[in-house]
Image (cartoon, rainbow, N blue to C red):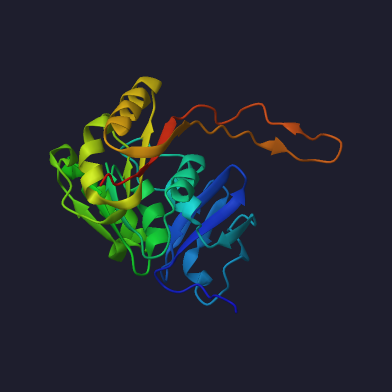
């Protein structure tokens, strides 16, 4: 089935592997680039994946934005998690349609939109953030990604406790995750997942010690490194630059002591 571009949709105007632009499709809208301007309204009724040319004759492709695109093209006010880390959080956290997930801190909503994309249509993300100015940015990013209906933004300090109970996962991207471990234990259902992302190993060590002291099991800390390969006949080799260390991810599961 062909999916047509509609008024109000977002498209990724792809030029090459280094240059692409997230644009909202509106009648009469003109988008200017260094390769000429594009009449964005002309995309209405065309299929995602369609080719179009700028005023200078340069070819662009109108792609449907993926979750990865949405994350990288967010309005930023904080450092965002890379897709390589987000993917592991989703997989190890067993996050799926219908999951109820507590998250902190929201930042500008990059991880939030990924979580919401997986829990919909019947799940929910409860996202805690102490800085109200970030929540306004996050709301706009989540609305643009079309997932705001599956998120509850909370301007609260999660170190003071978690309102929700019987949740499937608690996901943390904050400076002091070990302070949340006891609150996470109370909020999680049996066998629920605890996940925290920390830039330094000292943060991870403190978190692991708290997890051990609070009846969590299956505890592990990992680091994910990604190296792209230049795949070209007769010239295939690893690229010179790579995404190396971004942080350590600690995973654990809640056990019930009777």
Q: Which residue ends up furthest to the front in the rendered image?
A: 258
Residue 29 visible: yes
Tally the marks.
0
Q: Is residue 170 left or right of residue 35?
A: left
- Within the image, what quadrant is residue 189 found in? bottom left
- Within the image, what quadrant is residue 125 found in? bottom left
142 vs 98, nearest the viewer: 98
Residue 251 visible: no
Quarter of the figure that contains the N terminus: bottom right
Q: Residue at x 44, y 66 (%)?
A: 25
33 vs 191, nearest the viewer: 191
Q: Is residue 36 left or right of residue 89?
A: right
Counting from the top left corner in percent of width and height, residue 98 is at 36, 65
74 vs 184, nearest the viewer: 184
Q: Residue at x 15, y 51 (%)?
A: 163
Q: Is residue 232 above or below residue 62?
A: above
Counting from the top left corner in percent of width and height, residue 198 is at 37, 30
Counting from the top left corner in percent of width and height, residue 14 is at 58, 54
Q: Which residue ends up furthest to the right in the rendered image?
A: 234
Counting from the top left corner in percent of width and height, residue 101 is at 31, 54
Q: Is residue 201 above or below residue 107?
A: above
């Amino acid at each position: 089935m062909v999916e047509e571009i509609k008024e109000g949709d977002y498209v990724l105007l792809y030029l090459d592997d280094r240059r692409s632009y997230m644009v909202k499709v509106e009648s009469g809208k003109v988008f200017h680039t260094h390769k000429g301007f594009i009449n964005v309204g002309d995309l209405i009724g065309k299929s995602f994946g369609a080719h179009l040319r700028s005023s200078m004759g340069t070819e662009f492709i109108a792609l449907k934005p993926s979750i990865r695109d949405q994350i990288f093209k967010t309005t930023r006010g904080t450092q965002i998690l890379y897709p390589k880390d987000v993917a592991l959080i989703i997989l190890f956290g067993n996050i799926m349609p219908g999951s109820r997930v507590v998250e902190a801190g929201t930042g500008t909503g990059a991880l939030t939109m990924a979580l919401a994309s997986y829990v919909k249509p019947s799940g929910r993300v409860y996202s805690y953030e102490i800085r109200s100015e970030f929540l306004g940015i996050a709301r706009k990013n989540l609305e643009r990604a079309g997932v705001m209906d599956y998120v509850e933004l909370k301007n609260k300090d999660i170190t003071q406790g978690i309102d929700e109970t019987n949740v499937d996962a608690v996901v943390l991207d904050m400076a002091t995750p070990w302070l949340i471990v006891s609150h996470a234990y109370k909020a999680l259902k049996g066998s629920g997942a605890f996940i925290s992302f920390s830039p330094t190993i000292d943060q991870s060590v403190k978190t692991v010690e708290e997890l051990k002291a609070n009846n969590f099991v299956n505890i592990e800390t990992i680091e994910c490194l990604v190296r792209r390969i230049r795949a070209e006949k007769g010239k295939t080799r690893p690229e010179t630059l790579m995404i190396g260390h971004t942080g350590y991810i600690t995973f654990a599961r809640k056990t019930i002591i009777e």
